[in-house]
Image (cartoon, rainbow, N blue to C red):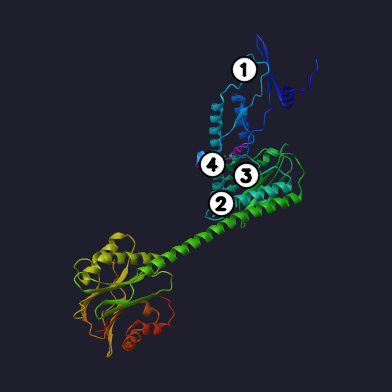
Amino acid sequence: MHHSPTDADQVRLDCQEFAVDKTASHHQLRIHRGDDPAPESSINASTNSQRFWQAFSAATGWRVDSSHPTSPQPNPADPEKRQPLKVLPAVAMDVMADHPLDAMPPVEKASAAELAEIAHDMAGEIETLQSHVRKRELELAAMAVAPYSTSDVDETCQSIEDTLRDATLALRFDAAAIYVLDDDTQFLNTRVVFGLPDDRLTAEPRPLRGSRGDLEAMVQEVVLIEDLHNDSGATWCAPEQAGSAICAAIYKGDLPIGTLWLYSNSRRPLDRSHAAIARMAAKQVALNLTAAVQSRAQLSSKQATEAVADIAAWQYSSLPANNDVADGWYVDAMIESPDRWSTGWHAWDVLPDGTVMVAIAEAVDTHANGAMAAATARAALTAHSGYRHSPRQMLQRISDTLWQSNTADQLVSLMYIRLDPESGEGEVAVSGQIEGMIAGSYGYRPLVASGCRPLASAIDIDCFESTFKLSVGEKLLAYTAGLRQDGIGQDLVGCCLRHSDGDAKDPLAMLRREIADFPVRNERGVLLLARRS
């Protein structure tokens, strides 16, 4: 009996395999679709992924719609926005089933869809983990060049993978891998692979001892192995099964840090052109790693510079501005530093009892540690100025704070002045290398003697104490050791103050102009207190 092709016949023509199930009571003819290619999973359609989806179809009777993207969806944090997987029967029909239910897959569609969703999510997690592994391996490879990690791991990883791909295509090979020596130069760790399963990155390190291919490459730069299947093939200790291979050494300067292996599935003759391509690929890999390290170093330098700028801005903004601290009393100060930060500060305030307080300080350490020690001393001054004290007691309390807050040396020179704005009488105490003078129209006189040990040198402070009286028109000037170290003597400072009456609004203006010609090699701190009426 002849008939035209039907839909069932068309399905039969599209099928790639037949299954005939025989039982004692009847025969069933099941027509299956051919095994569709496993949907591209989130592991880049690896062999394990294909095997899983084939096993999924065989066990459940359902398959994932090949038109659905099974790679990880955007917005993974919002599962509601992700398009659900669509499952279709893997068994197209059963034309001789005794019961309609016999023609259906053995697993319900809802259960199969749920299982597919779980598998899809797990595939996404695996891809994320493998991405982290690849990045970490690149970081470790970069550390073989210098003790820094890469600044942009994704970009570096892609660049090195592109190098391996280009070298593999140029040689007409099938796969490539990079192996980096550990710190003890005893083992080779797999860092980057191309054309090989990603699980190679988690494999155990290979011992360098006995690895003939790697050892000869580190001596000869490049080793060509035309046949890995002959009697001597096993002696090369190739990391992967292949027909032919090339091993090139990766150098940091003159020292080998690892090897680049390129694999061909088939045996093939190799010549100097193949060696040149492998050598160039190994050098390009070394350049990529070095560029990543330099980028990281530049980023670290930029971050350090920005941090220093933030510290300097904070120090500048926290210093008080020149003003009339009390009726008839004017106070001003300046700091000039050869660095972007300063290790000194100045402060003034009106205390609760109505007396005026002024202070100037400078850390002995001229580096960043000194800036932090100076900040600690300033915080201690603020904390202890709210209750009754004498200048010596204030220095002792600040010294105790510096002594107890750190095991390292936090040595600070400090001058503390307290005076009555009505009478002009005051007290002063100083520790360390800070000098002072009182100047008027008739000359100048020293305020205190210098040469005491700085604060926190010992449990008990070593300070010089004195009393003074500031008359109308006189100025009190305190300054750190930087002026003297830069060649600015006491006579120059005193003369500037004597003739600064014309600049009464800003007595430091003349001093600034006079010392402008002296190069700033040391930090200069100056504090001026003037009585106008």
Q: State the residue at coordinates (66%, 48%).
A: 164
Measured as percent of width and height from the top left, residue 151 is found at 54, 55
Task: Indicate which label's residue lies in the foreground, 3 or 1.
Answer: 1
Tell me, yes or no, whether the two marked residues, 4 and 1, touch with CB atoms within 8 Å: no
Report the number of numbered marks: 4
Alpha carbon separation for disc pair 3 and 1: 51 Å
Marking on residue 193? 3
Marking on residue 153? 2
Question: Observer-nearest residue: 6 or 473?
Answer: 6
Residue 492, picture quadrant: bottom left
Instruction: Find disc 4 in the rendering and name its residue.
Output: 129
Name which of mark 3 and mark 1 comes first in the sequence: 1
Give neighbour class at mark 3: few <14, some 14-19, many 20+ (Cα, 10 Å).
many
Alpha carbon separation for disc pair 4 and 3: 16 Å
Secondary structure of the residue carrying tag 1 is helix
Residue kind at label 3, given as amino acid type: Val
Question: Observer-nearest residue: 406 or 251?
Answer: 406
Residue 463, picture quadrant: bottom left
**Residue extent of the magenta highlight:** 68-77
Residue kind at label 2, given as amino acid type: Val
Task: Indicate which label's residue lies in the foreground, 4 or 3.
Answer: 4
Which quarter of the figure is the C terminus placed in? bottom left
